[in-house]
Amino acid sequence: MSVSTGRPGRRPTIKEVAAAAGVSTAAVSQAFNNKGRLSETTRRRILDAALELGWSPNAPAAALRNARTRSLALVVRRPTDVLGSDPHFSELITGIEGELAPRGYGLLLHLVSGHREEYALYERLAAEGRVDGAVLTDARDDDARPALLARLGLPAVLLGAPDGTAVVPRVGLRDQGAGITEAVAHLLSLGHRRVAYVSGPPELQHTRVRRTAFEQALREAGLRPFAVLPTDFSERHAVGATEALLAAERPTALVYANDSMAVCGIGTAQRAGLAVPRDVSVVGYDNLPLGSWLHPRLTTVDQQVQRVGAAAARTLLALCGEPVEETGVTGRPRLVVRESTGPAPPDGGATGAAAG
């Protein structure tokens, strides 16, 4: 095994060791720090590659990394007002904290507004040794965060459908489009043919997966979406999208990307003089407790938010060297039928909002 390190006299890098051994930089760090769950064969291959290249960890940096903080980071790239109004993250944090607190770990929540700020935050957290690992939310296409954290040697998990080829472990339910497929089938069985979808930001992987499932389910029934309107998950966008859909020739059913927006949708329809589900049916996504407190109670998709948070925490703790059993989550998103969906109106919802 021989890898050129470039200029004579230049100190080899951890990335070159990882490339020579055919592993990630995080695995190299685990091999030298005796963390993680590397096989002895993999560990020996890494050590041999490092020896041949003449690489060894920087002692002060290694000492800093090995000083346990017993803190994990959760970085959320959302506007502050959106986070404050979305109970999804409360449920997620409850699941994470349920695993961390009994083991003496704490969770540091950071809000960022964009990808540059998020990347800079991870760089700073790693350089200052402030956390032992990070939970990544909202998987994106061409997501640079897993590779960045691997380069920084910071253990991480990404919330999303499991993927054995991913740079960092992914924790979540499989078949992420299944709940939307069930929701469309449910609405079709009730006679709905004019179904609209109020989605999340298009750059998120789960937005793309769910939209694809929505469109495919309608296409298989010989239909097209009445409309698909992307939003930033905010109340303002949810209300605006609903008002636009109900303004003229309206759909008979509305599917929302989360429960918070669905609640806004129900309120907007009711203020327009429409009854839910008599005039328009509404479906949410997340199965948060607030959905069962409404009148009518919200039909929604259960994606086991707390259980996923707990599983992500266990996986991350194991990556940090804690003796934790990495039990994941099983199953797939499932539709929970309640009172906000009913038969399509006899007139097909072709007219505008009713008088108050």
Image: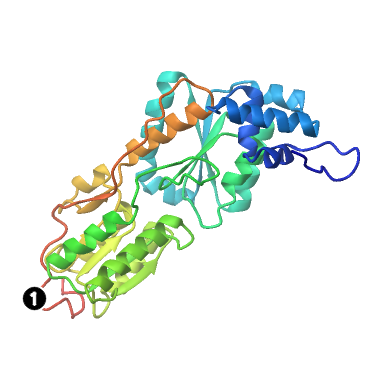
Image x and y of residue 218, in percent:
26, 70
User: Residue 21 location, x and y as percent?
Assistant: 67, 37
Q: Residue at x 28, y 44 (%)?
A: 288
Determine the image quadrant of residue 125: top right
Q: Name the image colouring.
A: rainbow
Residue 4 appears in the rendering? yes
Crowding at mark 1 (Cα within 10 Å: few <14, some 14-19, many 20+): few
Instruction: Identify the residue at the far front of this view.
Output: 1
Q: Position of residue 67 (x, y in %)?
A: 64, 20
Identify the residue at horizontal 28%, vertical 69% (top origin). 196
Look at the picture and state if 183 lies above or below 40: below
> Which part of the image, by quadrant, shows the C terminus?
bottom left
* Residue sticking out furthest to the right: 8
Q: Position of residue 78 (x, y in %)?
A: 48, 51
- SS for tag 1? loop
Q: Read off the residue under disc 1.
A: 346
Amino acid type assigned to the residue bearing label 1 in the image: Pro
Q: Is residue 146 left or right of residue 207?
A: right
